[in-house]
Every structure is written in C-alpha cells, then in structure tokens.
Amino acid sequence: MAAGLCRAFGSLLLSAAPLRTLPRAPVPGPQPCLPGGALAAARRGLAGSAPRCTTDPLWKCRVKYTVRPLGMKKTGGRDHTGRIRVRGIGGGHKRRYRMIDFQRLRYEEGAPPEPFTEKVINVRYDPCRSADIALVAGGNRKRWIIATENMQPGDIITNSSHIGRMAVSANEGDAYPLGALPVGTLICNLESHPGKGAQYIRAAGTCGVLLRKVNGTAIVQLPSKRHMQVLETCVATVGRVSNVDHNKRVIGKAGRNRWLGKRPHTGLWHRKGGWAGRKIKPLPPMKSYVNLPRVVVQE
C-alpha cells in the first residue's frame, strides 16, 4: 500500500515539473500491487479533495480605498463550498463595484479635526444599490458617497463634528452630528455608534425624522415608523436619499428581472392564507444603542 502511494505521488511530481531523472534499479522481492480502482482513488485523494472557493470575493477584501470600479464575480447564490445558499439568484448583466465611504466625517491623514467642505463632481447610477451615488472631492482625495435627493454636480457640502449651543441651519447633503441639528430635520445615512459609519436609512427615497433630543441622546423615527435612540454625536446626512421614484418603476417583462440577476420562481398559483391580510399591530419598542446607567434604589 505504501509503495503504491509513493508511486502515485512520484507520478504527480513528474507530471507537474518534468526533471532529468536517473534510471531506478529494480527492488528485489515481491512488489505490492494495487488494483486500478484503488490506485485511482489514491491519486484522487492526493490531488486534493478539499472544497475549492469558487466565488472568491476579492473585491470585498480590499483594504486600500479607491474610486476605481472593481470587478465582481457572480456567486449564483452559492457560498465558498459551492452549495446554493440563496435561491433565485443567477445571471444578469455584468456589474462593477464602487467602494462607498459611509463614514462622512473621515479626516485626511495629518489634518486637524475641523469642519471641512467637499465639492460634488458627479452623480451617477450604481448597479449595486437602489440609490444614486456621488463622487466628491476635497483636499487631496476623492470618494464615493450616497447622494441626496437634490444633489447636483458643483454643489458644496459641509462635514462637521461640532455641536454648539444653537442648532445649525444645514443645507441638504451636509453631514452633522444629531446634537447639532434642529428637531424635525429630515435625515439619512444614520450611524448607530459614533464613528462606525452609516448603517440606517440608505435605501432609495427613504428618510428619517429627528424627533427629540434628551440628555445627550437623540431619538430618530426610521422609515418603518420605529423609533431609535442613539448618542447625539452620531453623524447623519441632512435630506432624503436620491432616486425617489425607485419604487414606481415598472419591470414590464420577465427578461428585465433576468437582466437584474433574478431567476424565476415557480409559476404555480398559491392560495394566500391569513398572513396576506391587513393587520394592525402596535409599533415595536424603541431600539436603543445607548448604554444608560441603571438606577439603583437605596433602601
């Protein structure tokens, strides 16, 4: 058995790198032989049986920021083992990924933490999200951000972390902490923790409302009407997300869904149960990202 494995490994090495070898002297004694099936199985095992990564997302693992579009490899709904994890995905037009900087208050290297302005260069369609994106430039850098509803090339947007005694009169597209904005402001691209980057209110045409500010925190109404409590130092963008008419588009035919990378589902008729009716449910409790100190009752 061992001699057969050694012979199989030697044949693989010879096929991979053909080198000049010397004639081998015959080994005295009986030679162990393997049947063809066993030898083939041994060779297959040596060739490698570990699952290969068929969808290596190199465009997701990039560390250095760039405004250059990156090539994407389609997954077809499959994970690293090659098994389908999400059904209904496959095909579609080729896409390229543009790295979005969701942290609006990102200072340049060596720059003091002061308010800075940027100029909008271009507003364009992004195939990887429902909202439009804008290319802004300021200082010695360029970056992509989520565009607001009325953002146009040539606009000047402000980014600041200062919270004063009086609320600021911000323009659409500016980024300020929630504590610096007046109550009732429409906001988008909201952070859950200071400096983490925008995670909420990023879809096309959505916006939140700053309801009130209490003890260093701010309470925001999300597009789902749910209330969320965050620190007042969390940064948000003033205005509404661009591409407001995204929900009014008409697909028109099945082929357009295939262009978008959506595969067809079953065409059979399914009876709708009770889940399909209208329900009046109370709003869920307020989601808080603030670790408030607990009140200890002393006897």
Image: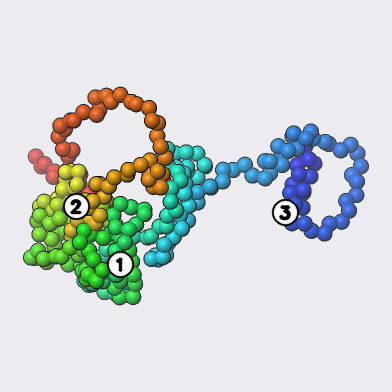
Label 3: few (<14), some (14–19) or many (≥20) C-alpha neighbours in 10 Å: few
How many callouts does the rendering have?
A: 3
Q: Secondary structure at mark 2?
A: loop
Label 3 belongs to which residue?
Answer: 16
Q: State whether residue 294 appears in this view.
A: no
In this orientation, which residue lies closer to the viewer: 52 or 2? 52
Which callout, 2 or 1, points at the residue further toward the start of the chain? 1
Contact? badges 3 and 1 (CB < 8 Å):
no
Label 2 belongs to which residue?
Answer: 207
Which callout, 3 or 2, points at the residue further toward the start of the chain? 3
Quadrant of the snapshot with the C terminus: top left
Label 1 belongs to which residue?
Answer: 122
Q: Depth-wise, is mark 3 or mark 2 nearer the camera?
A: 2
> Which residue lies most toward the front here?
252
- Report the Cα–Cα distance between label 2 and label 1: 22 Å
Q: Is residue 140 above or below residue 62?
A: below
* Residue 73 horizontal/vertical position (percent): 48, 52
Q: What amino acid type should be assigned to the residue bearing mark 2?
A: Cys
Q: Is residue 179 above or below residue 261?
A: below
- Report the Cα–Cα distance between label 3 and label 2: 59 Å
The part of the image, by quadrant, that contains residue 90 is top left
